[in-house]
Image (cartoon, helix red, strand yellow):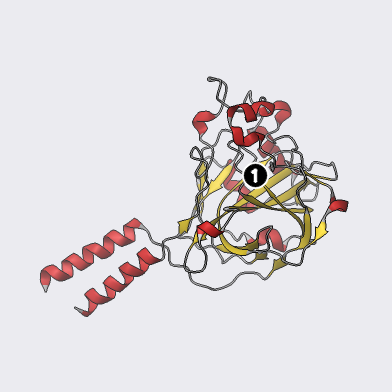
Amino acid sequence: MILSSILLICLIDQFVSQRTYCQLPDPIFNDGIKNSTWGDTDPSDWNYLNSDEWKSKVVTCGASFQSPINIVTSTAIKENSFPAINYILKTSTRNYWEAQRDYTKELEGEYDFITAFDISNQQYKYYARQFHFHSPSEHQVDGKNFDLEVHFVHQAVEDGEQSCNDIRNKLTVFGLLFQQTNTASDYEVFKPWFDDTVNKVTSFDMNDFFQKMTDKTYYHYAGSLTTIPCSQTVNWYVFTSPLPISKSQLKQFKDFIDNDDYFPSQSNNRPIQNLNGRTLYKGTASFNGVTSLPVIEASWSIIIQMVSLLLIQFIFI
């Protein structure tokens, strides 16, 4: 009976610990653009050759607060609130899997949380859900593109501390810029994307990218997704001091987008969008390293096992 009570408590705890992610308002978009919409077999399909026509395919792509933008550093206003980049160390139980995307390389999974402020200076909790790349960079800095931009996409959650109804920007995206150098070492986290024998990343520390930054200056603005449906629910932080990337790894990314007819000039970056009166903020991120807070994540296999054990207990009582 005691064992039954313990198992029941654990089972309830598993359900309680489930994360309720704040969904985007666009009915055609939830976790990402669908591969079925990519290409040119139908007039509604999108690709990077017809990026100027996206607004005729999805009305939100023609809205006023679109991304990416040219970050004009001299126009930025200093902000005193800053994101706390403090990922909990990823464990092997929460894998990242390569998503099958025709328009980018993407790893999807579930990493632990960061806290970030939106443009209204409200602080919310976000969990990292996926990261993907664009080459050359989507954002410009004073009119300059970089060789690569990786987007770390975080989604807000609803819990006892915050409500989805209060969160305007359901997503916070960190844009990290990379520039090829002859002395750069390969990033271990990028290797599985180009290894046919590997389809998941079992362990890596996202803090590692920020540890390599000598300058954690960012530019912050309210914007949109840079792929259809261009939802204007993104809290953007673009870190403008580029990280080094090796020639061989950059080539691997470029080769991926060279194998299709829909990437002009071997690129998958959306054209620059007008700022349209939005305020651009500048700050320096706080980096505190890895914490040790436990996160219990529910899985159906564990739940089924617990239910089975409970049934066995009741049968033999």
| Residue at 75% from the left image edge and 37% from the top image edge | 272
Structural crowding at the residue carrying mark 1, measured as other residues with C-alpha within 10 Å and reported as few (<14), some (14–19) or many (≥20): many
Above or below 47: residue 76:
below
Foreground of the two, 23 or 194: 23
**What secondary structure is found at the residue carrying circle 1?**
loop
Residue 313 seen from this side: yes
In the picture, measured across the screen, residue 122 lies left or right of residue 203, that is right
| Residue at 33% from the left image edge and 61% from the top image edge | 302
Location of residue 92 in the rendering, given as x and y in whole percent from the top left corner:
48, 60
Where's the C terminus, which quadrant? bottom left
Where's the N terminus, which quadrant? bottom left
| Residue 66, quarter of the rendered image | top right
Foreground of the two, 161 or 130: 161
Above or below 15: residue 74:
above
Question: Which residue is under mark 1?
Answer: 224
Above or below 284: residue 232:
above
Location of residue 210 in the rendering, given as x and y in whole percent from the top left corner:
70, 61
Residue 198 seen from this side: no
Foreground of the two, 223 or 87: 223
The outermost residue toward the bottom is: 2
Tally of marks = 1
In the picture, measured across the screen, residue 83 lies left or right of residue 240, that is left
| Residue at 67% from the left image edge and 71% from the top image edge | 288
In the picture, measured across the screen, residue 103 lies left or right of residue 23, that is right
